Amino acid sequence: MDSADQSPPIAPRENYIREAHGESTQDPWFWLRNREDPRVLEYLRAENDWTDFSTSHLNDLCGSLFSEIKSRVNEEDQSVPVPKDHWEYLVRTGTGLQYPLHIRRSRDQPESEKVLLDENELAKDEGYFAIGDLSVSPDHRRLAYTVDTEGNEEYKLTVLDIESGQEIDAGIDGLSYGLVWANDSTNLFLVKTDDAHRPNRVLRHAVGTASSKDVVVFQEDDEKFWVGISGTRSESFVVIGSESKMSSEYWLIDANLPETEPRLVEPRREGHEYRISHQGDRFLILTNEQAVDFRLMEAPTQALSAENWTEVIPHREGVRLEDVDVFETFIVVSERRDGVPALRVIDYLSDVEFEIDFPEPVYEAGSNANAEFRTRKYRYSYTSMVTPPSIYEIDIDTRVQSLLKQQQVLGGVDLSLYESERSWASSPDGTQIPISLVWRKDVIEWPAPTVLYGYGAYELGIPASFSSARLSLLDRGVIFAIAHVRGGGELGRKWYEDGRLEKKQNTFSDFGACRDHLVASGWSDSKRIVARGGSAGGLLMGVIVNQRPEAFAGVIAEVPFVDNVNTMLDPTIPLTITEYEEWGNPQELESFQVMSEYGPYENVVDADHPAILVTAGLNDPRVQYWEPAKWVAKLRSVASNGRPLLLRTEIESGHGGPSGRYDAWEEEAFVLAVILDFLTCADSSYSAGESSYNQEH
């Protein structure tokens, strides 16, 4: 940006009126939706230039933070090998390489390695690169994988002959996630998307034949539902799932007879969710039928409808039954109690049941890569806010737990200096909201500058897990806190239900209550708190900017869902209809009124806004780029306090940001630098381009 032009870009206003439920609403930045209009890209690039100029004083800090993040990572690393039949499969990274290599070796001769796929080679001419699925055929002779080079989560298929490395099939595009082989190692099941980016049908493709011969084996015409596929660990069935936010239905294909018609398990019913796993002559079924937090049932393989289900684990209110891992002679049940996971082993060989022990009171744990069905060992992952990601294996017979790998944290980091705790805030309605906190003991000064992270949607719990990049904040005396607000899944299904649809305001009130609790309890400096959230958590950020502008020194809103009313009013936008059960359908007056009451773009006001950084992805299929762009344009039209209002759009990527690991580290370093700047600028006026961060602070 020319130094003479030191003012932010102003998006032109154009007359556009939205009509809904008898109301006429001006939307002068509606034109930003037209990505074919050359002014759109021009405006987004101008915003990027303004952000670069406004944060130029942070360049040295960004470089230091990137170096710190990189220095803690073992760049020459590899995953724990995953055994499957006579082979072991692993992933390896190398110094200077943005992407991993996929490796196979013989279990008998581990030194005889073969590179199955070098993602760096595939990505060398691409601005963005991401593998969607990667699957080796049952006979271990073929490798199928899908690639996205736009960031729009639309994938293209390639199949290689592993021995020769030759491409034997390619070109099918418009694919979603899901790639399952039949046991003949020839037929491949794929998921295709419709014009609205909804995964809506399953294809059977014979490798090496023209795509015109592909067979549609399942098609979902209800636009609230989306389709996915998987294979049972027993390798007996291909599973087709069709799910909405609140209902599910499954179909089975015999993996040995791929050309047979799918067999329905249990027909969909409004509000009924279930999942299935195969074990011998039975299926295990997780269901919410008469069980808000789910229970576990079983049914004979040949008689799977609900009238044949019998109970294995009863419902216990407040104990969320999340998943079941099924092996030939045992199962592992994943539960969540008081926001903390538990792994319960039920061993049918010895007829005993036990829980896996964990060393800390607050942590995250779950199943890891377990490819083999006939095994007496189980791999699981473990982490906490002070314990790096770790992979363990437990022997079911002896109950001996072995640490297979823990993420290295290099750079002379002493992990004993960091401490974590859980606290509880009281929301306005009296609900107790858990908060996970972590800090560095020898540098913290109370009350401390704070980053408060929030999400609160889709029944997704934010894990109390480790981040080596986060250490750069903690080392500078910043406390990091996660507000486990309603709408997430931390405290059971009711926790989710109480934070969606007409109860969505609870999510925002909970977040504000967590902020106030941290201040009142002496954890946080009231003038130095930055809020951070992305996607649905970006909606949360947008709401607090409107509802609690005085409460935060800064807000980081990453790919934020902030134009929610307009997006949900338009069923032609990808994924809109499938989201009705999460947010409501604003075509209905009551939902429209609820969403309009909190919608960030709808409720922008002239207030003393905090400093704000907003990110977007031009090819994002989940939150369209124009949502953050319109929100920033509207905020800028009323902002008058001189605090930063910054928009940064990734032109070549989508919802997840840059695809390469070094690029991702640089992006995180930038965000961390902005956070530190916002924390330091809290008590002072802000001048674009002027340095205000003192590393000695």
Image: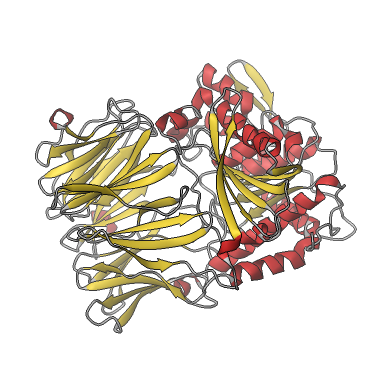
Q: Is residue 236 left or right of residue 574?
A: left
Residue ranking furthest to the top: 22
Q: Quadrant of residue 662?
A: bottom right
Query: Is residue 567 depicted above or below 326 in this figure?
Result: above
Would you say residue 280 is visible in this rendering? yes
Nearer the observer, 247 or 526 = 526
Residue ranking furthest to the right: 4
Q: Which residue is at a point 70% across and 68% down the rendered structure image? A: 64
Q: Is residue 339 left or right of residue 163?
A: right
Image location (x, y in percent) of residue 473: 66, 57
Query: Can you say which quadrant of the picture contains the C terminus?
Result: bottom right
Would you say residue 216 is visible in this rendering? no
Q: Which residue is at a point 73% across and 40% down the rendered structure image? A: 552
Q: How many marks?
A: 0
Snapshot colouring: secondary structure
Query: Is residue 242 depicted above or below 363 in this figure?
Result: above
Nearer the observer, 573 or 403 = 403
Image location (x, y in percent) of residue 128: 53, 63
Image location (x, y in percent) of residue 460: 46, 41
Query: Can you say which quadrant of the picture contains the N terminus?
Result: bottom right
Image location (x, y in percent) of residue 453: 60, 45
Q: Quadrant of residue 276?
A: top left
Q: Which residue is at a point 86% across and 47% down the rendered structure image? A: 684
Q: Is residue 246 left or right of residue 526?
A: left
